[in-house]
Amino acid sequence: MPGQPIPIQQLIELLKNHYAISAKDILPLQLGADMSALVYKVNASPNSYFLKLKYGNHEETHMDVIKLLHDSHVKEIIFPVSSIDGKLIKQLNDFKMIVYPFIEGFDGFQQVLTKNQWIKLGKTLKQIHTLSIPLALRKSLRKEMFSPKWREMVKSLYSQIESDTSTNKMTIDFKRYYRKQFASIYRLVNSAEELVKQIQFDGQDYVLCHADIHAGNILMSSDESFYIIDWDDPMMAPKERDLMFIGGGVGNVWNLPAEVAYFYEGYGEVVINKTILSYYRHERIIEDIALYGLDLLSSNQSDHSKRVSLEHFKSMFEPNGVVDIAFQGLE
């Protein structure tokens, strides 16, 4: 968790000293769900920048992935700005600084992808999935282990809910809605456990995956170009780890058959393991239930954070939302 925000004047000095960027103004941004980061828009002349401060101990493997994508001519990424001493990540005391060019645009929750953008997204993801990954990088990236971690956390939520005595309105509403959806939640966990038993995985078949390529991580600019953002946690996994988002309905978008058809027009012919795809769609929902539940049952989270978590939690169970789509995959 970030500590006290750094004074704006200090950030201006850090950018000047380490990046030779003369910032006129720095504006905090409320973006993303990364609780260990603070992000800002830096207004400078002639360019603007996106500044990310990352707290805690984090592997820098994701930056090696960004370099690989850049060197492999994947154009749909935003490459960081180097510091004066040539670093893409600048370590400063208890946080890291990463500076990117600022791209004005909308994410996939705010704006629908066009047919051409869907086709291009398919081509781009195919390019990423077929990259040859250097052995050292492959070894350093996290690998899919089909862990029961999130399923076990969701199983424990019910007892936490029953013993919780919070009077917070959002927490009370969450507990009520959780009980209402208990049968669906139980089915999600049970189905995921049955699906994972059917999966025979071979790490040699794993590909480089973004691992969180939902609509919120597609940034579209005004000229129909787009960028895949938030490469903080890439992994080696079956291709279905990424493909499950296409048609998966995360955030109640990307759930139309035409969009799926456009994407695969770009991605090309592919054999999809439906068991693995279905598992991932279940597991993603289970992970979100665990995270939203922990947030809503915590006494340390703000009302704003709880409100956002409650909205996201409820939205998963809406018609043609992620839960409906996951269950359809079992039919």
Image (cartoon, grey):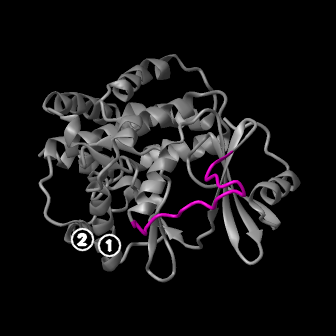
Image-based side of 24 in relation to 290, left or right: right
Determine which of the numbered discs, if any, sits on residue 76 in the image: none
Q: Could you say whether the residue bearing mark 2 is in a helix, strand or loop? A: helix
Extreme residue toward the right, this view: 9
Residue wearing tag 1: 120
Residue wearing tag 2: 266
Q: Name the residue nearer the viewer: 289 or 277.
A: 277
Dominant secondary structure, magenta: loop
Mark 1 vs mark 2: which is more N-terminal? 1
Task: Give the vertical position of 234 relative to 115 (above or below).
Answer: above
Q: Is residue 78 magenta?
A: yes
Q: Name the residue nearer the viewer: 7 or 155.
A: 7
Q: Position of residue 199 (x, y in %)?
A: 16, 33
Q: Could you say whether the residue bearing mark 1 is in a helix, strand or loop? A: helix
- In the rendered structure, which amino acid carries the disc numbered 2? Gly
Range drawn in magenta: 73-90
Q: Position of residue 310 (x, y in %)?
A: 52, 43
